[in-house]
Image: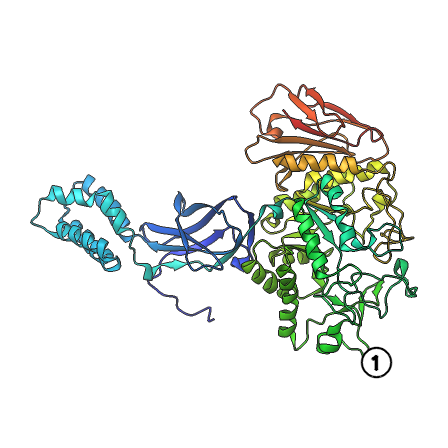
């Protein structure tokens, strides 16, 4: 493209600053089905002519455009509000054209008011009607020509000609057929409309192989299904499995990631692939494909969806290594380069080489893995370490899948630098893991949440807060207590509408660290675990209580509606959550000193709460076992939180 070349001179309208739009429309901004979307654009032209500006939208799998006129806001800005009842990947554009008849119509009225001669003006208007007739279908063209004949007839009564020139019916029809050959069109942009589960989800991760519970017998999908009623009772709506594929035998890791496994060690599910198959196969000890589909049915009957982990990496004995050696990096000694993230080493995992000359076949094969599991009924995928794969691959892969399967949800497990996380989100990932786990004081947590919710990132990055994962046991949990686990879950669940935990480790307070690492000791990644689901002092009831609030109240079903409240105690964090019409409102207060009682006062001025005034607040604390009523007078109420009793208040404003 020659940036110095001439443009079409008859296209006088300038289209600028289409909003919302990401990076010139290359990446989709995201909304939820049912959202009202305000589109704005700067549109102008030389001289004083009026413009006609319209928004055109269509879903990528359709041919028909939905056209919305954009109304002028003044100062060369136009707006249209759009609401969709369909999910999917959409493209849109803004078109602007000179409104020749509208400009004449406005000028004619001014000249008539000034008492100027109007015969010539009527003839000019007639020419414009003739031009419109040439672009109109025959039915409308006949009418437009009749009106043009009368308007151009200098022998006709001037009052009747003026009346015709003033006719809104005539103007409306004439303006329906502007000179579209001369219109300016913005570059096409993308928009992703997601289903409700994409905006509000509560994930529960567990290993099906540990569901027998004796630490010896390998669990199956049938064993995993026995846990579904309990998980649903705790209020989760997504169950998520680590990879369910065959596990490599070459360089298999033993317990606690040792390089010397015992013969009966089960290995890491993330070491994908063995002689019996790869990413389209199921580990034989978990069951058959029919068993997995039965599990999907069992989950659906309980209102749960199933997420699968897709890890695009291979064990050394994965079939791809022999069938497609060009997809891997080979070292001078004839071995394949295994994965490393110094000081971590993954001898049982081979990364895929995205610089392969056979990259197109590689891309097609990887995309087909998702398509295979979608055919089996899976609609949700957690993707392992996507930031270590080609960024452009993800954009191509996910957006093409979303165009055909808009219901599919992708979670990016990318604990990486912000720009890479955000790029993955622009490329189509529905959710992204976050730094929530490492924000352990009120000040740093508030700063981080405000970055996520008040910056431009909210257009594309939807955070998913996880207090723990099989890979991450933060020092705050390692050294914490029961209150720490409860408090961190409350923070995740009330700050973000998308959350998850790795269980049963979390609700059973498993916090023994591997020495010197931010991981659980005796990690379930490398062994079958024995979980006592009825262990004393577990926090299942507290998790269920919080999840019930999330499921019942709209205020907690979106992330970007948080407003922080100042407190004079640096250990206490407080914030307001409310739904769109402010009919569902909560104040959440958490003492992040998990050991000591803290007291303080909040700034509850009317401006903070968005009220003209208030004489006090009638509150109901839903986190206590029996909801308790409070009445706060004044604008700086006093409160105290003793972690030995409760780390938090979750107040509904009555």
Pick the front one: 641 or 468: 468
Q: In the rendered view, does 132 fall on the left or right side of 96?
A: left
The answer to whether 388 is drawn above or below residue 451 in the figure is: below
Q: Is residue 261 above or below residue 580?
A: below
Way the structure is coloured: rainbow
Position of 31 compared to 12: left or right?
A: right
Quarter in which the C terminus is drawn? top right
For the point 37% across and 56% down, which residue is it? 13
Disc 1 secondary structure class? loop
Residue 367 shows in the view: yes
Please state which of residues 590 and 33 is positioned toward the viewer in this rendering.
Answer: 33
Q: Quadrant of residue 64?
A: bottom left
Answer yes or no: is residue 46 visible. Answer: no
Comparing 610 with 196, the one in front is 196
Residue at the disc numbered 1:
333
Residue 432 sits above or below residue 371 on the image: above
User: Looking at the rendering, which quadrant does residue 142 occupy?
Assistant: bottom left
Say left or right for 576 vs 10.
right
**Residue displayed at 84% across by 80% down:** 333
Q: Quadrant of residue 496?
A: top right
Q: Is residue 416 left or right of residue 559?
A: right
Task: Kindly give the residue lying farthest to the left in the view shown.
Answer: 155
Badge 1: few (under 14), some or many (20 or more) residues near its Cα, within 10 Å?
Answer: few
Q: Position of residue 361 (x, y in %)?
A: 63, 74
Q: Is residue 91 above or below residue 102?
A: below
**x and y, in percent, of residue 416 in the image:** 73, 57
Tell me residue 305's x, y (percent).
Answer: 66, 49
Q: Nearer the viewer, residue 177 or 154?
A: 177
**x and y percentages locating residue 435 in the rendered image:** 74, 49
């Amino acid at each position: 493209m020659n940036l110095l070349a001439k443009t079409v001179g008859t296209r006088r309208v300038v289209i600028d600053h289409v909003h919302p739009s990401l990076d010139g429309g290359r990446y989709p901004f995201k909304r939820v089905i049912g959202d009202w979307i305000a589109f704005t654009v700067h549109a102008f032209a030389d001289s004083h002519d009026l413009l006609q500006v319209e928004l055109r939208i269509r879903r990528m799998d359709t041919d028909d455009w939905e056209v919305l006129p954009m109304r002028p806001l003044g100062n060369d800005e136009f707006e249209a509000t759009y609401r969709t009842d369909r999910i999917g990947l959409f493209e849109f554009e803004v078109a602007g054209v000179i409104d020749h008849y509208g400009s004449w119509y406005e000028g004619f009225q001014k000249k008539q008011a000034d008492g100027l001669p109007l015969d010539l003006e009527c003839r000019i208007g007639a020419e414009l009607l003739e031009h419109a007739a040439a672009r109109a279908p025959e039915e409308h063209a006949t009418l437009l020509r009749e009106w043009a004949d009368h308007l151009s007839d200098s022998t006709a009564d001037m009052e009747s000609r003026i009346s015709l020139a003033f006719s809104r019916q005539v103007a409306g029809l004439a303006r329906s057929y502007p000179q579209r050959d001369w219109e300016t069109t913005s570059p096409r942009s993308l928009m992703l409309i997601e289903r409700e589960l994409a905006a509000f989800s509560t994930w529960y991760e567990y290993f099906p192989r540990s569901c027998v519970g004796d630490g010896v017998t390998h669990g199956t999908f049938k064993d995993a299904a026995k846990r579904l009623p309990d998980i649903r009772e705790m209020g989760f709506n997504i169950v998520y499995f680590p990879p369910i594929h065959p596990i490599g035998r070459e360089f298999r890791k033993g317990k606690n990631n040792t390089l010397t496994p015992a013969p009966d060690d089960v290995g890491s599910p993330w070491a994908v692939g063995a002689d019996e198959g790869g990413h389209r196969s199921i580990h034989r000890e978990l069951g058959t494909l029919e068993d997995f589909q039965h599990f999907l049915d069992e989950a659906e009957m309980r209102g749960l969806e199933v997420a699968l982990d897709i890890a695009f990496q291979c064990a050394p004995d994965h079939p791809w290594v022999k069938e497609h050696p060009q997809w891997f990096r080979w070292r001078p000694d004839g071995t394949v380069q295994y994965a490393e993230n110094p000081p971590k080493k993954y001898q049982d995992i081979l990364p895929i080489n995205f610089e392969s000359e056979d990259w197109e076949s590689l891309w097609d094969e990887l995309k087909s893995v998702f398509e295979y599991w979608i055919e089996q009924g899976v609609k949700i995928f957690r993707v392992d370490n996507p930031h270590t794969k080609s960024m452009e691959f993800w954009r191509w892969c996910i957006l093409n899948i979303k165009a055909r399967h808009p219901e599919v949800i992708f979670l990016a497990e990318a604990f990486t630098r912000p720009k890479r996380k955000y790029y993955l989100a622009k490329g189509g990932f529905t959710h992204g893991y976050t730094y929530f786990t490492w924000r352990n004081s009120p000040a740093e947590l508030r700063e981080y949440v405000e970055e996520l919710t008040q910056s431009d990132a909210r257009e594309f990055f939807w955070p998913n807060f996880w207090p723990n994962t099989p890979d991450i046991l933060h020092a705050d949990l390692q050294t914490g207590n029961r209150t720490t686990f409860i408090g961190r879950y409350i923070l995740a669940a009330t700050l973000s509408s998308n959350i998850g935990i790795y269980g049963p480790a979390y609700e059973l307070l498993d916090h023994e660290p591997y020495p010197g690492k931010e991981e659980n000791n005796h990690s379930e990644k490398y062994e079958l675990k024995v979980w006592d689901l009825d262990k004393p002092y577990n926090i299942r009831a507290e998790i269920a209580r919080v999840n019930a609030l999330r499921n019942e109240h709209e205020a907690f079903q979106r992330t970007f509606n948080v407003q922080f409240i100042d407190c004079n105690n640096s250990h206490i964090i407080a914030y307001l959550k409310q739904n769109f019409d402010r009919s569902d409102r909560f104040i959440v207060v958490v003492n992040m000193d998990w050991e000591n009682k803290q007291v303080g006062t909040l700034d509850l001025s009317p401006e903070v709460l968005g009220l003209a005034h208030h004489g006090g607040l009638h509150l109901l604390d839903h986190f206590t076992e029996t909801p308790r009523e409070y009445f706060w007078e004044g604008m700086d109420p006093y409160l105290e939180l003793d972690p030995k009793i409760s780390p938090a208040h979750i107040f509904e404003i009555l």
